[in-house]
Image (tube, helix red, strand yellow):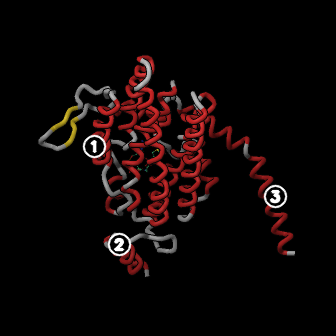
Amino acid sequence: DESALERHFEATIAADNRLEPRDWLPEGYRKTMIRQIAQHAHSEIIGMQPEGNWITRAPSLRRKAVLLAKVQDEAGHGLYLYSAAETLGADRADLTDRLINGRQKYSSIFNYPTLTFADVGVVGWLVDGAAICNQVPLCRSSYGPYARAMVRICKEESFHQRQGYELLMTMMRGTDAQRDMVQDAVNRWWWPSLMMFGPPDADSPNTAQSMAWKVKRHTNDELRQRFVDMSVPQAEALGVTFPDPDLRWNAERGHHDFGEIDWAEFKQVLKGNGPCNAERVAHRRAAQDDGAWVREAASAHAAKNAGRIGA
Ligand code: 3HC
């Protein structure tokens, strides 16, 4: 009966065990997991665009090869996560439609342009750094397939962050113009990277329930603070500053204080009014349309083959 199933669900979460596709799940849990996993997958797929923009213009073969590998990894992360969403009964094609029709979200961060090659380094350092901050705890998320996907993804994100930081280190040892390019990119990406962690806990409708169900292990503000504390010494080692006059170490708190985030900008980007929203979604729509014939051919071939195997 349902109450026994409910008790089993609650006991599994209380014991920090994993819920698996075969387990009974409350509808609300299934719904929020599909929501988070699908939007995480959408973020990985859309995230290929800002960096893909520089593959043909990388300054060396090595930089091109590393960037190519990273963008391919993001595609893999997306497909991995769509598979995790499918274990909850979601349909990949339907999720893609929701993304393209604006009924599901992707991370705000990818609505900003990558203006110079230094952006490739800063995206690796700060955006993948923020993603790691957010994703390492998700390796302990209560839904098994999602948590296991995170283990593999976090390993590859570390490579993404390391290559970005190394790229910036190289530029900082270059000319003044290169150092200026790096600082300019940091100035443009710092605040949007803080917004990746989501709205303040007080304005986060999903956090309370997601913490209770151990979907999330930390709140948005906790992870944002962890990211700021981690990034300050890295910026010092690199020789760049963050565009925040209020950023300073607070010995009482044992954390860095930082300035007010522009939540109006965040809301605008989520509403679709960021610098690149239209371009990102149009690009994804075009890829979906241009790929239709391949999907049709593959299913026709599969159907024909299925007929043959059966015969
Ligand atoms: N961009 C877009 N939408 C965002 C957002 C952001 N940065 N932050 C929050 N939102 C949305 C939420 O999805 C929610 O809308 P919804 O109910 O329609 O889904 C609304 O704003 C309120 O936010 P909440 O804090 O209540 O929502 P969550 O509890 O889901 O927290 C989250 C948001 C922290 C992003 C959480 O969903 C999460 O941890 N998701 C998994 C991680 C993820 O998606 N990371 C994307 C980073 S990019 C990436 O991974 C690619 C990397 O390789 C570079």
Residue 302 lies, in percent from the top left, at 79, 62
Question: In the rendered image, which residue does mark 3 sit on?
Answer: 300
Residue 18 lies, in percent from the top left, at 41, 70
Q: How would you rate the neighbour count of disc 3 (Cα within 10 Å): few for under 14, some for 14-19, many for 20 or more? A: few
First-in-chain label (2 vs 3): 2
Question: Which kind of residue does numbered mark 1 sit on?
Answer: Gln
Q: Quadrant of the C terminus?
A: bottom right
Q: Quadrant of residue 196?
A: top left
Q: How would you rate the neighbour count of disc 2 (Cα within 10 Å): few for under 14, some for 14-19, many for 20 or more? A: some
In the rendered image, the residue lying farthest to the top is 177
Res. 311 visible in picture: yes
Question: In the rendered image, which residue does mark 1 sit on?
Answer: 225
In the rendered image, the residue lying farthest to the left is 252
Q: How would you rate the neighbour count of disc 1 (Cα within 10 Å): few for under 14, some for 14-19, many for 20 or more? A: some
Question: In the rendered image, which residue does mark 2 sit on?
Answer: 10
Q: Is residue 147 above or below residue 185?
A: below
First-in-chain label (1 vs 2): 2
Label 2: which secondary element: helix
Q: Can you tell which of label 2 and label 3 is closer to the viewer?
A: 3
User: With 159 as the anchor, is 222 left or right in this view?
Assistant: left
Q: Quadrant of the N terminus?
A: bottom left
Q: Quadrant of residue 254?
A: top left
Q: Is residue 171 above or below residue 66?
A: above
Q: Is residue 168 above or below residue 297?
A: above
Label 1: which secondary element: helix
All told, the count of numbered labels is 3
Q: Residue at x 39, y 81 (%)?
A: 4
First-in-chain label (3 vs 1): 1
The residue lying toward the viewer, choosing from 89 and 307, is 307
The residue lying toward the viewer, choosing from 204 and 170, is 170
| C-alpha gap between disc 2 and disc 3 | 45 Å
| C-alpha gap between disc 1 and disc 2 | 30 Å
